[in-house]
């Protein structure tokens, strides 16, 4: 490339095509990085939207009349007036399975990334924990014939327990000790009395 200066003489301007190519490459990389970041942001928003939609779907089922009947049936089967009925892990009340299977399904959705464990804790923990503790032998006992059936539920409960301990700021405490037979019984009575309506919203 040539150029004419003010004195009328010509001078050559050398173009470093390697530098031009490098600048172009940097611009391309920057543009690509921006596009990738934008796509990642869009994907994250899409996942958040789907997670909320999935949570609402599970909550609708939880509050559906069919599942309310199942929850009431479990409460009735576990109570005898003002005491909890004894039960055998080999022959548990049939009503336990529909309720536990719902929580197992929540655990599967969390494992697959379709729900956030915090959202499940926020929405279902107060309902799931007393039932889980009451039926813990069926879910966790090594001799239980159902030990392999509730793997995702156990994982989910551990995750929600961690959140609960942080929320209570008593990480060294055993929050399971809170669930005495009297409190579990109160939970089942509450299920029957209110017909499964939400208790309150966490803050």
Image: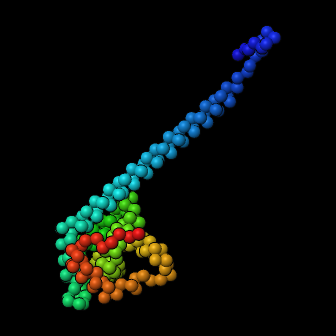
Q: Residue furthest top?
A: 8
Residue 59 vs residue 154, the one in the foreground: 59
Where the C terminus falls, by quadrant?
bottom left
Residue 4 image position (x, y, % from top left): 75, 12
Q: Quadrant of residue 103?
A: bottom left
Left or right of 140 on screen, residue 174: right
Residue 78 image position (x, y, % from top left): 22, 83
Q: Residue furthest bottom?
A: 82
Residue 119 image position (x, y, % from top left): 38, 64
Residue 6 image position (x, y, % from top left): 79, 13
Residue at left 34%, top 64%? 108
Q: Quadrant of residue 198?
A: bottom left
Q: Quadrant of residue 151?
A: bottom left
Where the N terminus falls, by quadrant?
top right
Left or right of 17 on screen, residue 31: left
Whether residue 77 is visible: yes
Left or right of 150 on screen, residue 194: left
Q: Is residue 36 above or below residue 126?
A: above
């Amino acid at each position: 490339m040539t150029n004419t200066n003010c004195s009328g003489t010509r001078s050559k301007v050398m173009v470093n095509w390697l530098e031009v190519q490098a600048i172009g490459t940097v611009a391309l990389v920057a543009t690509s990085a921006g596009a990738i970041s934008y796509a990642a942001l869009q994907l994250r928003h899409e996942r958040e939207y789907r997670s909320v939609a999935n949570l609402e779907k599970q909550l609708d089922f939880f509050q559906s009349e069919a599942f309310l009947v199942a929850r009431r049936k479990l409460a009735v089967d576990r109570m005898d007036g003002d005491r909890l009925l004894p039960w055998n892990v080999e022959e548990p009340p049939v009503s336990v399975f529909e309720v536990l299977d719902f929580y197992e399904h929540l655990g599967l959705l969390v494992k697959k990334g379709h729900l956030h464990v915090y959202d499940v804790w926020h929405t279902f923990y107060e309902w799931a924990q007393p039932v889980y503790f009451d039926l813990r032998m069926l879910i966790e006992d090594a001799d239980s014939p159902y030990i392999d059936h509730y793997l995702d539920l156990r994982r989910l409960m551990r995750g929600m327990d961690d959140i609960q301990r942080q929320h209570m700021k008593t990480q060294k405490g055993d929050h399971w000790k809170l669930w005495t037979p009297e409190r579990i019984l109160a939970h089942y009575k509450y299920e029957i009395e209110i017909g499964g309506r939400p208790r309150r919203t966490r803050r």
